[in-house]
C-alpha cells in the first residue's frame, strides 16, 4: 500500500481527500507499514517523522500571536474554524473542471457566513468594516489560494467597484446578490494589449442619445479583456472599463455594468468569451477573455460616483481634469493591492512554517561517532537561508497593519501617501513571497518538491502575485515618481547646490552627531542601536532621492526631454529610490511596534528580529553604503558578523516564532510540518 498518490501540485490519499485533520494525519503516519507479502513478512516500518525539536521558549508564542492577530482576532478565529472543517479539505486540483466546482462551492459557503457583507454598506446589511474584511481575507490565505482569489474577484473587485464607483442605485440593485454569491461577477479591466497602462484601454463605450444607452465594443483582438476571473464559467455581470465617448467627445476611461451571460449560463448576444485554460497555478479560478460587439447598456448602468451622463445626454463631472478624474477612480480601488500584499505574506508564513519545522526535525551529516547527526537548523548556512526571511515576514506584517490603518483614515482613497505605500508594499512583499517560497523549497530538499508538502502549490499559486493588481516594476516606478513629485514641490525654489547641501549634509550630520566616528564603530551595541539603523536607512533614501531628482532636472533642463522620456531614461534610479523608501518605512514601523509591546521577553525577541531585518538589509546594500562613505570595509565586515550572530540567536526561537503565526495544521497539510 502506498502512503500518498501525487497529482500535479496537489495530493490525494487513497480513497479520500488530500489534507487530513491533525488527528487523522497522526493516525495515518503512525500506522505501521508492512513490508513483504504473506506469512513471511516480519518487518514493519513506522510511518513517522522525528518530532519537531522545540527549545524552551523565552517568550509566549500566544502573546505574539495576539499581537499579530490584532483587534480582529474574532473573525480570524471564525475563518480558521471554517476552513478546518472537512468540507474545506483540499481538492486534487489536477482535474480543472472539478477543482473549479469545488472552489465555487467554497465561495458560496463563505458567502453564507456573511463574509461578503463585511465591508459593504450598512444600507444593504453590511458592516462597512474593510480592516475586518482584510483580516478575514489574510487568514483565508492559509488555506487554498484559488479560493482567496475567487473571493477577491467576487467581493473585493466586482462588488467593491460597484460600492466605490457606483451610487445608491447600483448598490441597492446589485450588492445584496453579489454578497450572497447568487450574482457572480467579473472585474473586466485588463486587456490583451493593455495591462498596467489602464488609461490606454481600447474598449469603447459610445453614448447614443436616441436609445439613452451606451454601445460597448472591442474594436480589435487586442482590446479583448484578458485574465478576467469568473469570466470563463461563473460570471453573469461584468464591471467593464472602457473609453467613454459622448457626442463625439472622448472623456477617458469609465466603468460600466455589462451583462455577459444569461440565466442558462450561455454568453449573451454580442459577447464572446474564451477560457484562458490551464495556468501555472490558481486553476480553481475560471479566468477568461471577453470581447464585446455592439452590446447595449442603459445609461443608468454607468458607475457614476465621479462622473455621469445626464438625462439630457450631457457629460458631467465635478473633477474637470481627465487625468485627475481617472486617478481618483482608480485610487478608490487601492484596497485590492493591500489585500494582495496581506495574502502574499500569509502564503510566505505558511512556507516558512513548513521549512522551519522540517529543519528542526531533519538531521544530516556531521555527528561524532555514535551520536546523532546535526539538525538542519543548527547549520549556519541553513540559518542564513531562513532566519532573515523570518525577520522580513514580521517586518512586513507590521507595515501592512500601518497601511490598513492609513487606508481607513484616508476615506477618499486617493491620498498620494496611501497610494505610494500600497504600491510599494504590494511590490516588495509579493517579490519576497516568490523568493522566500523558492528558498523554502530548497531548504526542504526533495521533501519540498513533493506535492504532499504543499510548497509546490504555494509556489505555483502565488507566482502571479508579482504581476497582477499592478506589475511590480511598474508599481515601484509609481512610488518613485510620487516621491520625486513631492521632492520637487518642497524644493523647487532651491538651486541644485542648495539642495545637495540640504539633503546630503543634513543626513550625514545626523549620523555623525549621534555616532561620533560612526564609520569606524563596530561594537554590537552600536550596530544593534535602532537610531543608527534608522539613520542609515534614511541616509540611503535621502541620497538616492536627491540623486534621482538631480538627474531628472538635468534631463528636463539640459537634454530637453519631456517628463515621460526623462522617467523612461532613469528607470534604474527610480527603482533604487522606491526600494530605499519602502525599506525605510518598514523599519520605522517595526521599531514603533516594538515600543508598544508590554511583555519584556517578547520585546527582547522582537528587537532581535528587527535588528536582523535592519542589518541584513544594510548588508545586502553594503556596496551602495561603501560607495557613499557611510560604511568602511572594516564596519561592513562587522555588519556581516552581526547578521551571522543574529541568525544564530533567532534560530533558538525560530520554531516558536513560526508557531505564533497561528496556522492550523490542517491548512499546512504538509506531513514534514506536523
Image (cartoon, rainbow, N blue to C red):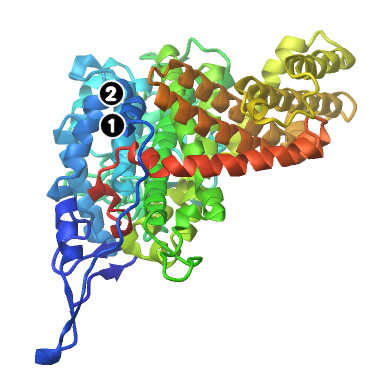
First in residue order: circle 1 vs circle 2: 2
Q: Quadrant of residue 140?
A: top left
Q: Secondary structure at mark 2?
A: helix
Q: Position of residue 346 (x, y in %)?
A: 38, 40
Q: Is residue 246 left or right of residue 82?
A: right
In the displayed structure, would residue 125 be above or below residue 456?
above
**Quarter of the image with the N terminus in it:** bottom left
Q: Which mark is residue 107?
A: none
252 and 662: which is toward the camera: 662
| Residue located at (64% from left, 26% from top) | 525
What is the number of callouts on the image?
2
Q: Are marks 1 and 2 in contact (CB under 8 Å)?
A: yes
- Cα–Cα span, label 1 and label 2: 8 Å
| Residue located at (14% from left, 60% from top) | 27
427 and 646: which is toward the camera: 646
Q: Secondary structure at mark 1?
A: helix
In the displayed structure, would residue 4 be above or below residue 221?
below
| Residue located at (49% from left, 52% from top) | 221
Q: Is residue 422 left or right of residue 561?
A: left
Q: Is residue 325 left or right of residue 636?
A: left
547 and 450: which is toward the camera: 450
Is residue 576 something one can see in this rendering?
A: yes
Q: Position of residue 169 (x, y in %)?
A: 26, 18
Q: Position of residue 263 (x, y in %)?
A: 17, 44
Q: Which mark is residue 72?
A: 2
Mark 2, Cα crowd under 10 Å, few <14 / some 14-19 / many 20+, is some
- Which residue is labeled 1 in the image? 136
Q: Position of residue 154 (x, y in %)?
A: 29, 37
Is residue 259 something one can see in this rendering?
A: no
Nearer the viewer's eye, disc 1 or disc 2? 2
Amino acid at each position: 500500500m502506498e502512503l500518498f498518490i501525487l497529482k500535479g501540485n496537489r495530493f490525494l490519499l487513497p480513497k479520500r481527500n488530500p489534507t487530513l485533520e491533525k488527528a487523522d494525519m497522526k493516525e495515518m503516519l503512525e500506522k505501521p507499514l508492512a513490508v513483504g507479502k504473506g506469512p513471511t513478512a516480519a518487518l514493519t516500518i513506522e510511518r513517522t517523522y522525528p518530532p519537531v525539536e522545540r527549545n524552551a521558549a523565552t517568550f509566549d508564542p500566544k502573546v505574539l500571536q495576539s499581537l499579530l492577530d490584532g483587534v480582529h482576532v474574532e473573525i480570524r478565529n471564525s475563518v480558521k474554524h471554517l476552513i478546518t472543517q472537512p468540507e474545506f479539505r483540499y481538492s486534487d486540483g489536477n482535474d480543472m473542471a472539478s477543482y473549479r466546482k469545488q472552489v465555487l462551492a467554497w465561495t458560496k459557503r463563505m458567502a453564507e457566513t456573511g463574509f461578503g457583507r463585511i465591508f459593504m454598506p450598512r444600507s444593504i446589511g453590511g458592516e462597512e468594516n474593510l480592516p475586518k474584511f482584510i483580516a478575514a481575507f489574510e487568514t483565508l490565505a492559509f488555506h487554498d489560494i484559488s479560493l482567496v482569489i475567487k473571493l477577491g474577484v467576487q467581493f473585493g473587485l466586482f462588488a467593491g467597484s460597484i460600492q466605490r464607483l457606483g451610487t445608491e442605485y447600483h448598490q441597492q440593485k446589485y450588492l445584496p446578490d453579489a454578497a450572497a454569491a447568487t450574482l457572480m461577477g467579473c472585474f473586466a479591466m485588463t486587456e490583451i494589449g493593455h495591462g498596467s497602462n489602464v488609461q490606454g484601454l481600447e474598449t469603447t463605450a459610445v453614448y447614443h442619445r436616441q436609445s439613452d444607452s451606451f454601445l460597448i465594443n472591442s474594436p480589435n483582438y487586442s482590446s479583448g479583456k484578458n485574465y478576467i476571473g469568473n469570466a470563463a464559467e461563473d460570471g453573469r455581470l461584468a464591471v467593464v472599463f472602457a473609453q467613454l465617448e459622448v457626442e463625439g467627445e472622448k472623456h477617458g476611461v469609465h466603468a460600466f455594468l455589462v451583462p455577459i451571460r444569461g440565466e442558462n449560463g450561455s454568453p449573451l448576444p454580442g459577447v464572446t468569451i474564451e477560457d484562458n485554460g490551464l495556468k501555472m497555478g490558481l486553476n480553481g479560478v475560471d479566468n477568461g477573455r471577453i470581447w464585446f460587439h455592439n452590446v447595449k447598456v442603459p445609461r443608468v448602468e454607468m458607475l457614476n460616483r465621479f462622473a455621469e451622463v445626464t438625462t439630457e445626454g450631457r457629460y458631467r463631472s465635478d473633477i474637470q481634469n481627465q487625468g485627475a478624474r481617472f486617478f481618483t477612480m482608480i485610487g478608490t480601488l487601492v484596497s485590492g493591492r493591500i489585500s494582495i500584499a496581506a495574502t502574499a505574506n500569509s502564503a510566505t508564513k505558511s512556507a516558512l512554517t513548513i521549512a522551519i519545522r522540517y529543519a528542526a526535525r531533519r538531521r544530516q551529516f556531521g555527528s561524532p561517532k555514535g551520536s546523532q547527526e546535526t539538525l538542519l537548523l543548527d547549520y549556519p548556512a541553513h540559518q542564513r537561508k531562513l532566519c532573515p526571511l523570518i525577520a522580513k515576514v514580521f517586518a512586513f506584517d507590521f507595515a501592512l497593519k500601518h497601511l490598513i490603518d492609513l487606508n481607513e483614515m484616508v476615506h477618499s482613497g486617493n491620498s498620494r501617501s496611501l497610494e505610494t505605500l500600497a504600491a510599494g508594499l504590494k511590490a516588495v512583499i509579493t517579490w519576497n513571497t516568490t523568493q522566500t517560497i523558492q528558498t523554502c523549497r530548497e531548504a526542504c530538499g526533495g521533501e519540498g518538491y513533493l506535492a504532499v508538502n504543499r510548497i509546490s502549490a504555494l509556489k505555483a499559486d502565488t507566482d502571479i502575485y508579482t504581476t497582477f493588481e499592478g506589475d511590480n516594476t511598474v508599481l515601484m516606478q509609481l512610488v518613485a515618481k510620487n516621491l520625486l513629485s513631492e521632492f520637487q514641490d518642497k524644493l523647487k525654489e532651491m538651486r541644485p547646490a542648495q539642495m545637495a547641501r540640504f539633503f546630503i549634509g543634513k543626513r550625514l550630520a545626523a549620523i555623525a552627531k549621534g555616532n561620533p566616528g560612526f564609520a569606524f564603530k563596530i561594537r554590537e551595541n552600536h550596530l544593534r542601536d535602532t537610531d543608527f539603523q534608522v539613520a542609515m536607512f534614511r541616509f540611503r533614501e535621502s541620497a538616492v532621492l536627491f540623486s534621482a531628482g538631480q538627474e531628472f532636472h538635468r534631463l528636463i533642463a539640459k537634454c530637453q526631454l519631456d517628463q515621460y522620456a526623462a522617467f523612461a531614461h532613469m528607470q534604474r534610479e527610480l527603482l533604487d529610490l522606491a526600494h530605499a523608501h519602502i525599506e525605510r518605512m518598514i523599519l520605522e514601523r517595526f521599531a514603533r511596534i516594538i515600543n508598544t509591546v508590554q511583555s519584556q521577553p517578547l520585546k527582547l525577541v522582537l528587537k532581535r528580529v528587527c535588528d536582523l531585518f535592519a542589518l541584513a538589509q544594510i548588508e545586502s546594500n553594503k556596496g551602495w553604503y561603501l560607495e557613499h562613505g557611510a560604511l568602511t570595509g572594516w564596519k561592513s565586515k562587522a555588519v556581516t558578523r552581526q547578521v551571522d550572530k543574529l541568525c544564530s540567536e533567532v534560530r533558538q526561537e525560530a520554531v516558536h516564532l513560526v508557531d505564533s503565526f497561528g496556522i492550523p495544521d490542517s491548512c499546512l497539510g504538509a506531513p514534514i510540518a506536523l
